[in-house]
Amino acid sequence: MSLEAHYAEVRNDLRTGYGRGIKDKGIDLRRPPESDEIKALRGRINGLQSVIDDQNVAIVKLKREVSALIASIAGIKDILVDYGEKLDKDCEEIKTRYATVNKLLRMVSAGEGIEIPQLTGGRRNKHIVNARHIICYLASRYTTASLAVIGRSLGGRDHSTILYAASKVGKKRIPGSRLDEKLKAYENQLARLTAVAVPD
């Protein structure tokens, strides 16, 4: 019998009830029943698959939250950059608009014809001392610098020395005196260079 004829006979047997005959003879071609161990194992596998599915959902959710957080951080970074640029601009404006001890040093140095190293040094020449006292007076009135900062700018002098010098000039300032006229000239010059408001 050829192979083709054999296949044809098998197909015919299946069509005419040969398959039912197999069942009639007690031959069960179905999958055998699972043992308790296999059922338990299958249950564990299904449980693990459920856990994996839950974890995948959690991971997707976490990815979304991380993406949102990154976007938020990027937004905060932009805000900080803008704030930093504004702060730099404001600092530059403050440096320009407001009086500083260094500005006063340069101004009095030019006005009195005294080099800055002499004003910040230890020389006790009367002309230099008077100019140094004027700086202390103006700096204590028209700058935001503390007495300690003014003292450091004037060669490391302590705050009590600055306070004494400023107080001395204030007491000696008599309206119409030469000292008063000199101080007014410096105050007017300071007002032109900065945003400092000086008394009339």
Image (cartoon, rainbow, N blue to C red):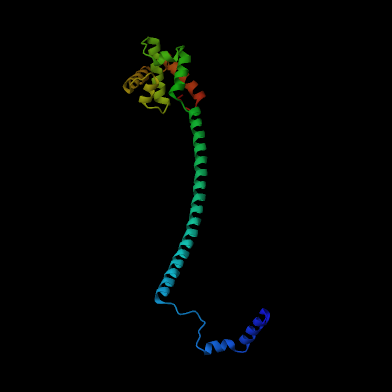
Foreground of the two, 79 or 124: 79
Let me know if residue 146 appears in the view. yes
Coordinates of residue 138 in the picture (x, y in percent)? 41, 22
State the residue at coordinates (51%, 40%). 81
State the residue at coordinates (36%, 16%). 172
Above or below, comparing residue 6 to residue 85 in the picture: below
Let me know if residue 177 appears in the view. no
Above or below, comparing residue 190 to residue 78 in the picture: above
Q: Residue furthest front?
A: 1
Q: Where's the N terminus, which quadrant?
A: bottom right
Foreground of the two, 147 or 180: 147
Foreground of the two, 96 or 13: 13
Above or below, comparing residue 109 to residue 55 in the picture: above
State the residue at coordinates (68%, 80%). 2
Coordinates of residue 7 in the picture (x, y in percent)? 65, 81
Coordinates of residue 154 in the picture (x, y in percent)? 39, 19
